[in-house]
Image: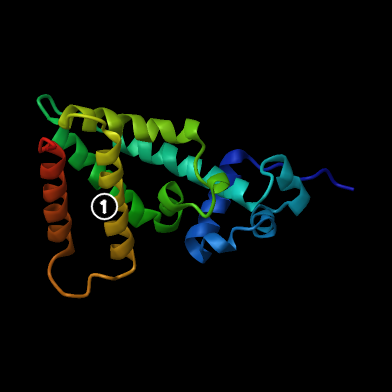
Amino acid sequence: MPAPQRVSQEALVAAIRRIAEDDGIDAVTMSSVASAVGVRTPSLYKRAADRHGLLRLAAEDAARELVTEMSSEPFAPGEGPAGRLRRMAHALRAFAARAPRVSGLLFAAPSAAAAPSPEAGEPLLRPLLDVISAAASGDPLPAARTFTAWIYGFCTMEQAGAFRLGGDVDEAFEYGLDVLLDAIARPRA
């Protein structure tokens, strides 16, 4: 009997992400991924306990990719917190456009086991909390949640083609972002 084929972590994650983007999150199963990488299903249990474990691999890869993208350009000298948050928002929107289904795992995974681990999510959350702390007084968590919820919601609606009233969607994104950044910077009463 021939030796079982070995699959690199990169090839495994690429297959999971491809299935998720092409066929949907529900199509990511142990058997579909095994078939995509050319191994028998039982061999995947060395890498993940179940399909949610496979989804976590994709979510953590997406988190790393987004962190890299958000930090690829250094902040400009004199660029304030609003400028940094604007860049983060644009990076997230661009990522969501490229990987709409996998990006959803970052914010709306089907279970905690399918979401990025706290260790994988922290490099995404920490810079956001730091920049919001510089922009607003008090606990940055409510503002960070509002910021990410608005961007994720906007991107989800954009991907679904839900903006059907005409007008420029890019302009609407900038308007919403301006309003949100103004609200974050405004002292709380």
15 horizontally vs 163: left or right: right
64 horizontally vs 5: left or right: left
Q: Is residue 71 visible?
A: no
Report the label total.
1
**What's the residue type where badge 1 is placed?**
Trp
User: Residue lying farthest top?
Assistant: 77
Query: For this rendering, which residue is in front, 56 or 137?
Result: 137
Q: What secondary structure is marked by label 1?
A: helix
Residue 59 location (% of width, % of height): 49, 45
User: Residue lying farthest bottom?
Assistant: 165
User: Residue lying farthest right?
Assistant: 1
Q: Can residue 165 be seen in this view?
A: yes
- Residue 57 image-quadrant placement: top right
Q: Mark 1 points at which residue?
A: 150
Query: For this rendering, which residue is in front, 63 or 141?
Result: 141
Q: Residue at x 27, y 51 (%)?
A: 151
Q: Which residue is drawn at 19% across and 35% down?
A: 84
Colour pattern: rainbow
Q: Which residue is drawn at 46% across and 50% down?
A: 105
Residue 170 location (% of width, % of height): 16, 59
Residue 92 location (% of width, % of height): 30, 47
